[in-house]
């Protein structure tokens, strides 16, 4: 007990440290209970961080902020409209085609599995039958989920309509009145909040860099993947390329998961031949260039984190807050790192991790 009491006094004797700890607990609890209701606000904050970079770049040149915000916001809306009316119809068509051909792929896969015991005697037909039954049950569950989604499409369309109206409005006002909003929040803080301000400045910069870097990574990886798949004549090239681009949102895990549909579609289209090998080789080159060239260039200003810390952050925060926890896993891990670095007593080595 004396050791615990001494540790508590050493780390929480500073009132600023106590305030920071209570503020973090309150913030995490608020997001935990009200995150679903505030999803449009969270989406708007992400987009506002994305657009804040060009706004600041143009504002530095002397252009009034309101004029810059209007210009950047109009450019963003033009990009969004082009995305909705240009890309989404193509994705819908390819998704429909894939679902239409999926039963044939499943049947082909079952026939291929049935041939395995002939070439590998140590695998019994009973084991193959178990795998086939598992595939059938999973396919049935998937079909039922798709059907339930189609039945519940009307509430989903209403939600999309609400997002389409609220999110652009929130983004515009977050950009236009950023200083007023931040000033309103800081008005509730105690006069002495140097520790919280130092942590916030670092995390605010890291989140901005991360969101803008992640946007460009999705755009570049997705664009290169679509172009590569189209060049090689792969089916559902746009759909799979977009999935590859979106997979970078989840570090390491996303790339591993999206490899499965890419490999399966390539196999069902070409089989085990040179076309399959060339496609997978090009895909792995894209992944290698993303991890070893693009990520260091885009995220050079973001605090470096060990891969184990990133994976643990994705699993932990994703389990807490779903998609937003996964998306903000690296900034949240950066927040933890910033707190540990700025916490009173950290210079004595109390927060060192072996």
Image: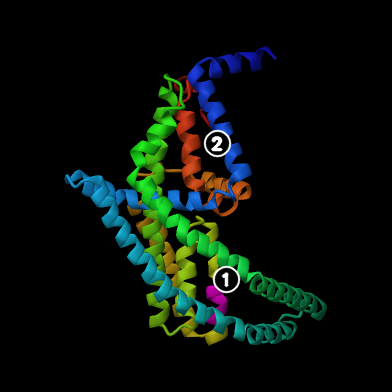
Q: Secondary structure at mark 2?
A: helix
Magenta segment: 260-267
Q: Nearer the viewer, residue 235 or 89?
A: 89
Task: Report whether residue 321 is seen.
Answer: yes
Would you name the residue on which mark 2 appears? 27
Location of residue 336 with respect to 117 vertically, above or below? above
The percent position of residue 25, horizontal first and vertical second, equals 58, 32
Most extreme residue toward the left is 62
Location of residue 163 with respect to 330 vertically, above or below? below
Give the quarter of the figure containing the N terminus: top right
Residue at x 61% of width, y 37% of height = 29
Quarter of the image for residue 81 reads bottom left
Task: Report whether residue 271 is seen.
Answer: no
Residue at x 50% of width, y 16% of height = 14
Would you name the residue on which mark 1 appears? 260
Residue at x 50% of width, y 22% of height = 17
Location of residue 113 with respect to 49 vertically, above or below? below
CB-based contact (under 8 Å), mark 1 and mark 2: no
The percent position of residue 66, horizontal first and vertical second, equals 26, 48
């Amino acid at each position: 007990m004396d050791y615990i009491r001494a540790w508590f006094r050493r780390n929480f004797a500073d009132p600023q440290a106590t305030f920071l700890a209570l503020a973090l607990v309150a913030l995490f609890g608020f997001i935990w209970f009200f995150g679903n209701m505030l999803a449009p606000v969270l989406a708007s904050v992400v987009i506002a961080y994305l657009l804040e970079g060009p706004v600041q770049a143009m504002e530095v040149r002397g252009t009034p902020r309101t004029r810059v915000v209007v210009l950047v916001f109009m450019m963003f809306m033009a990009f969004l409209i082009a995305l909705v009316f240009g890309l989404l119809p193509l994705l819908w068509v390819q998704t429909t085609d894939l679902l239409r051909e999926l039963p044939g792929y499943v049947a082909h896969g079952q026939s291929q599995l049935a041939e395995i015991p002939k070439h590998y005697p140590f695998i019994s037909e009973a084991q193959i039958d178990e795998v086939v039954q598992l595939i059938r049950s999973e396919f049935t569950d998937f079909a039922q989920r798709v059907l339930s989604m189609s039945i519940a499409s009307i509430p989903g369309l209403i939600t999309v309509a609400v997002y389409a109206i609220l999110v652009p409005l929130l983004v515009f006002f977050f950009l236009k009145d950023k200083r007023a909003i931040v000033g309103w929040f800081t008005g509730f803080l105690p006069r002495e909040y140097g520790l919280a301000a130092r942590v916030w400045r670092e995390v605010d910069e890291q989140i901005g860099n991360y969101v803008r870097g992640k946007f460009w990574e999705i755009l570049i990886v997705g664009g290169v993947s679509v172009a590569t798949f189209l060049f090689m004549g792969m089916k559902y090239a746009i759909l799979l390329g977009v999935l590859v681009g979106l997979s970078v949102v989840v570090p390491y895990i996303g790339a591993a998961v999206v490899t499965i549909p890419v490999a399966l579609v390539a196999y069902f289209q070409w089989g085990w031949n040179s076309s399959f090998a060339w496609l997978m080789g090009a895909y792995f080159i894209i992944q290698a260039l993303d991890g070893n060239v693009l990520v260091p260039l885009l995220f050079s200003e973001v605090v470096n984190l060990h891969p184990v810390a990133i994976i643990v952050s994705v699993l932990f925060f994703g389990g807490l807050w779903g998609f937003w926890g996964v998306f903000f896993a690296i900034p949240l891990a950066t927040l933890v790192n910033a707190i540990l670095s700025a916490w009173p007593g950290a210079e004595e080595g109390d927060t060192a991790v072996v």
